Image (cartoon, rainbow, N blue to C red):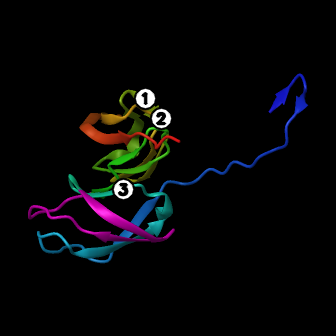
Amino acid sequence: MTTAAGTSNPLNFYYIGAPFKASLSAASGPSADGNTVTISGTGLATASSVAFGGNNATATITSDSLLSVTVPAGTIGSVGVRPTSGSTSGGTAVTITGTDLPTTESVTFDGVIAPFSVINSTTVSVFTPPGSAGAVDVVLIATGGSATAAAGFTYVADPGI
């Protein structure tokens, strides 16, 4: 930082990559809660929440490559595993899954554009922009159209001092 009075000492800033889930220790389990699975991947130490479908789960960060998750009760069927909430200051890594995602042009949270990376044809990794506390719509626009997850992400206010 430079002002008319001089230049301050430099401070380092590091960009952190989005977390990426590589595998689950179990791909299925009972519909009752209490089952534990391990999520392996990279950048998992920054995960602020994990959800199975629409059900939030309790996660314990083991390392940057491992999360231990207590699976919540759910209905029988297939569900995606993803973060669903994060800080109003932004920077929460979110994984969007779907089909035909290589042509993704933009992702917005409550109308605010978010940085994203296309991982493969079914996965896009996104960092949330700053936002106001509460549930917001997530919109992905691709060459073939758009998809909206109504109230798909919830911003949680940072604790004050």
Secondary structure category for the residue under label 1: strand
Q: Residues within 10 Å of mark 2 (few under 14, many from 20)?
A: some
Q: Is residue 88 above or below residue 39?
A: above
Labels 3 and 1 touching (C-beta < 8 A): no
**Contact check, label 3 and label 2, Cβ < 8 Å:** no
Residue closest to the far left: 76
Is residue 62 visible to the viewer in this orientation of the structure?
yes
Return the disc, 3 or 1, that comes first in the chain's sequence: 3
Separation (CA) of disc 3 from disc 1: 21 Å
Please tell me whether mark 2 or mark 1 is closer to you in this view: 2
Q: Please tell me whether residue 59 belongs to the stretch shown in magenta.
A: yes
Mark number, residue 145: none
Q: Quadrant of the N terminus?
A: top right
What is the x, y in percent for residue 9?
A: 85, 42
Identify the residue position indicated by label 3 in the image. Answer: 49
Q: CB atoms at circles 2 and 1 under 8 Å apart?
A: yes
Q: Secondary structure at mark 3?
A: loop
3D distance between C-alphas at marks 2 and 1: 8 Å
Earlier in the chain: of badge 2 and badge 1, it is 1
Label 2: which secondary element: loop
Residue corresponding to mark 1: 112
Residue at x-position 43% and y-position 29%: 112
Please, what is the three-letter code of the amino acid marked with disc 3?
A: Ser
For residue 135, side relative to residue 48 (left or right): left
Residue 22: give x, y in percent of width and height. Answer: 40, 68
**Residue 154, x across and y down, in percent:** 32, 41
Residue 130 tag number: 2
As shown in the figure, which amino acid type bears the numbered disc 2? Pro
Q: Is residue 142 above or below residue 58?
A: above
- Highlighted magenta segment, given as a residue range: 56-80
In front of the other: 75 or 144: 75
Q: Image point 40% across, 64% down: which residue?
A: 21
